[in-house]
Structures are given as C-alpha cells and as structure tokens.
Image (spheres, helix red, strand yellow):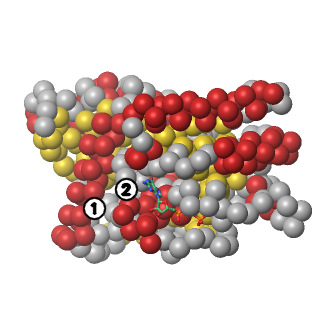
C-alpha cells in the first residue's frame, strides 16, 4: 500500500465554514453566492438553468414559456447557491430597480448571447452592463456564454466567437477597463459544453480550489491515474479536476458514466438506514454516505481503451478517474486505499464534502 504524499492542507485554528464561495461584494454574508442569468429575450437563459439544474431534456426547452419576472431558485448541493433568471427585456440599471439588491451578493453574472441570432444589440447591452458594474462592483466575474453554437458550422462558430470577444474587449479598452474580469465560453444545451462552462464558473467561487487540485494531483501521481474529476452528482458540474490538461472528451466519458450510475441507483437504490455512530462528544451522529438512494458505490468499468473508477464520496460528490488501459484491476486495492486518504483530506478542507448535518435538506 502506498500513502498519498502530504497534501497541501492549510493549517488553521479557525473551523472551516460550510459555505466558502468568494463573495467579493457580500455585506450580509449569508453564504449563498448568486449566479445571475442575463441576456436578450429567447437567448436561452431559462433553458440553461432547466437543463443543468433540473435535468430537463434539451428538446423540451422548446416549450418553455418566456420569463416575465425574476425567477429565483436556491440550489442545495456541495455548496448552497442561488440562480436568478432575469427576463430578457429588463433594464437593471433603471432607477426603479434596487441595483444594490441585485448585485450585492453576486458570485457571477452569466450573460447569454444567442450566436444563431443577430447579436449586436446583445453586445451593446452587455458592454453597457459591464461598464456600469465597473463603477460599483468591479470584482464581479462576468461570464459570457456564446450560446446555441450547436447550429453553426465549425468555421462560422469560431468567427462568431472571436468577433464577440473582440467587440467586447475593444469597448472595454476604449474605457480603460482592459483587465475587467470577463471570460467567454461557447455553449449549447445539446452537448456537454454547457456543463463544462458552468463547472468553470462555479469553480471560481470555490476558494479551496487550489487545495482540491493539489489533492487530486497527488492522487493521480500516486495511483497513475490519467485524469480525475470531483463531480457534483446531481448537476454533473465538476467542482475540481487535477491540473493535467483537460479535454472535453474525458469530461464527456465521466459525465455519461454519472448518468448511468444515477439511472442504476434510481432502479436498484434503496433507502439506507441512517448509521448511528458515536460522535467525538459522545452524542450519536448521522454519518452520510452515498447519494440519497444508492449505497456508497465503488465501481471499476472498462470503457473502450480506458478503465473508469468511480467512488461516491458522499450524497453530493463523486470522484471519477480515467485510468488508461494498464491492468488497473490489480491496482484496485491501492486505489481504494488512496482514495480513502483523499476522502479524509477532502473532509478537512471542504466540510460540506461529508454532507452537512447542520443544514437540513429541502
Ligand atoms: N439550438 C439551440 N436552441 C436552444 C439552446 N438553448 C436554448 N435554445 C432554445 O431557445 C429558445 C429560447 O429559450 P429560453 O430558455 O426560453 O430563452 P430565455 O432567454 O429564457 O427567454 P426569455 O424568458 O424570453 O428571456 C427555446 O426554444 C430553446 O429550445 C441551444 O443551446 N441550442
């Protein structure tokens, strides 16, 4: 058996808080970062939130009604956050709106642009919004989703993407804001790109990300894992991966495998009795393992040339590793052991990773 090398766990006397997202503008500090979905009418905002957070099949978004008022939803998962879906026509900077109330607690502003439609007006509104925000909330991450790219040819997709970036950056540098925190993604609800983009948006809200990446790097090098992802099971957002180059292909394999696991646990899952263990203070405590329905799961599957290793970390998170093709069956015991070490370290840096008995589920 091999132990993981010492992971970089920050030494601190301060007990970690349950939510740890970066809240640059937070005054109340209720610990729930907001993701604002904004953009023109019919650009795809409600579809994105329904597909990512409610598992709506993409083809059914055709029947979504237009959003007429701000739709606020709370998400409870490995961390709590809120998603606010804005109607396309709203002018947020109209004096009638309480701008502070909208932008005060924000984690990220996601601006959706329909790449299949005329986009100049959308860019104008985006530029105005960023310039307005730069005065009062310069730290807000603006995440631009160049959306519905599924309908475009490869060439046209690339040209559109570059054109949009150029137009936004030109406007920002004309006003002296070259370094505004604005990022761009090509997205579609018809493939994995929307999940990958959301993963990157969410990761920016997790201050322990470098530590999680260091832990995953240690795990990968100790067990000769090609790529490891820590997934939020229900949304299929990955909250961290090791620092080796990521390609969408490995994300797709892992995310499809999560679907299989969810499907299987829906059929064969069972309500586990709550385990009563003795807590440190002598009180019995509930130990959560696995997701809601299934028992804690460890699998090793051969997928084409790769072996996949999956282990539920708790009801929110699963670790999935892509193993390459060199007989990992023999290594399984070592991997199990090291993943156990990883899990223990994760609990220390990310207490929510053990499920959160203090915050009851909805
Ligand atoms: N081809 C394609 N169509 C999409 C995609 N995302 C959303 N759509 C379609 O775009 C249309 C508008 O989507 P909505 O989610 O209602 O747009 P919205 O931005 O919420 O619109 P408002 O509520 O009016 O502001 C729907 O018919 C969706 O099916 C995508 O990635 N690709």
Residue at the image point whose x is 46% and y is 36% from the top: 157
> Is there a contact, CB below 8 Å, between mark 2 and mark 1?
yes
- Checking the image for residue 233, the label placed there is 2
Q: Would residue 316 appear left or right of 100 to someone viewing this image? A: left
**On the image, numbered disc 1 is attached to which residue?**
262
Quick check: 309 above or below 69? above
Q: Where in the figure is residue 241, as x and y percent of width and height?
A: 41, 36
Residue at the image point whose x is 69% and y is 30% from the top: 169
Residue at the image point whose x is 32% and y is 60% from the top: 290
Q: Would residue 335 appear left or right of 148 to someone viewing this image? A: left
Quadrant in the rendering for residue 340: top left
Of callouts 2 and 1, the N-terminal one: 2
Give the Cα distance between marks 2 and 1.
8 Å
- Checking the image for residue 330, the label placed there is none
Q: 169 or 138, which is in the foreground?
A: 169
Seen as rendered, the residue at the extreme right is 95
Quick check: 209 above or below 324? below
Q: Would residue 40 appear left or right of 27 to someone viewing this image? A: left
How many numbered circles does the render carry?
2
**Mark 1 neighbour density, 10 Å: few (under 14) some (14–19) many (20 or more):** some
Visible residue check, residue 164: yes
Q: Where in the figure is residue 35, as x and y percent of width and height?
A: 62, 55
Q: 350 or 125, which is in the foreground?
A: 125
Secondary element under disc 2, as helix, strand or loop, is loop
Q: Where in the figure is residue 32, as x and y percent of width and height?
A: 64, 59
Quick check: 269 above or below 215? below
Q: 281 or 362, which is in the foreground?
A: 362
Quadrant in the rendering for residue 40: bottom right
Visible residue check, residue 239: no
């Amino acid at each position: 058996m091999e132990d993981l090398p010492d992971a970089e766990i920050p030494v601190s006397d301060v007990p970690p808080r349950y939510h740890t997202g970066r809240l640059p503008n937070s005054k109340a500090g209720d610990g729930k970062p907001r993701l604002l979905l904004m953009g023109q009418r019919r650009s795809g905002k409600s579809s994105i939130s329904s597909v990512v957070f409610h598992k709506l099949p993409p083809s059914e978004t055709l029947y979504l009604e237009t959003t007429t008022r701000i739709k606020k939803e709370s998400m409870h998962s490995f961390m709590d956050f809120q998603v606010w879906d804005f109607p396309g026509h709203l002018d947020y900077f109209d004096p009638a709106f309480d701008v502070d109330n909208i932008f005060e607690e924000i984690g990220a502003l996601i601006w959706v642009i329909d790449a299949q439609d005329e986009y100049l007006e959308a860019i104008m509104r985006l530029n105005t919004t960023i310039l307005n925000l730069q005065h009062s909330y310069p730290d807000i991450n603006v995440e631009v989703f160049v959306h519905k790219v599924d309908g475009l040819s490869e060439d046209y997709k690339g040209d559109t993407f570059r054109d949009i970036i150029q137009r936004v950056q030109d406007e920002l540098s004309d006003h002296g804001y070259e370094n505004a925190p604005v990022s761009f993604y090509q997205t579609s609800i018809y493939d994995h790109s929307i999940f990958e983009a959301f993963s990157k948006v969410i990761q920016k809200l997790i201050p322990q990300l470098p530590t999680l990446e260091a832990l995953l790097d240690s795990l990968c090098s100790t067990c000769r894992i090609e790529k490891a992802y820590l997934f939020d099971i229900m949304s299929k957002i990955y909250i961290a991966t090791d620092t080796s180059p990521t390609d969408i292909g490995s994300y797709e394999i892992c995310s499809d495998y999560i679907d299989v696991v969810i499907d299987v646990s829906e059929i064969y899952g069972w309500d586990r009795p709550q385990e009563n263990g003795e807590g440190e203070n002598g009180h019995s405590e509930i130990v959560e393992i696995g997701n809601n329905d299934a028992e804690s799961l460890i699998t090793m599957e051969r997928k084409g040339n790769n072996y996949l290793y999956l282990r539920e970390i708790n009801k929110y998170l699963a670790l999935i590793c892509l193993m390459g093709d060199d007989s990992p069956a023999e290594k399984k015991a070592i991997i199990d052991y090291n993943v156990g070490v990883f899990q223990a370290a994760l609990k220390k840096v990310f207490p929510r990773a053990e499920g959160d008995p203090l915050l009851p589920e909805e």
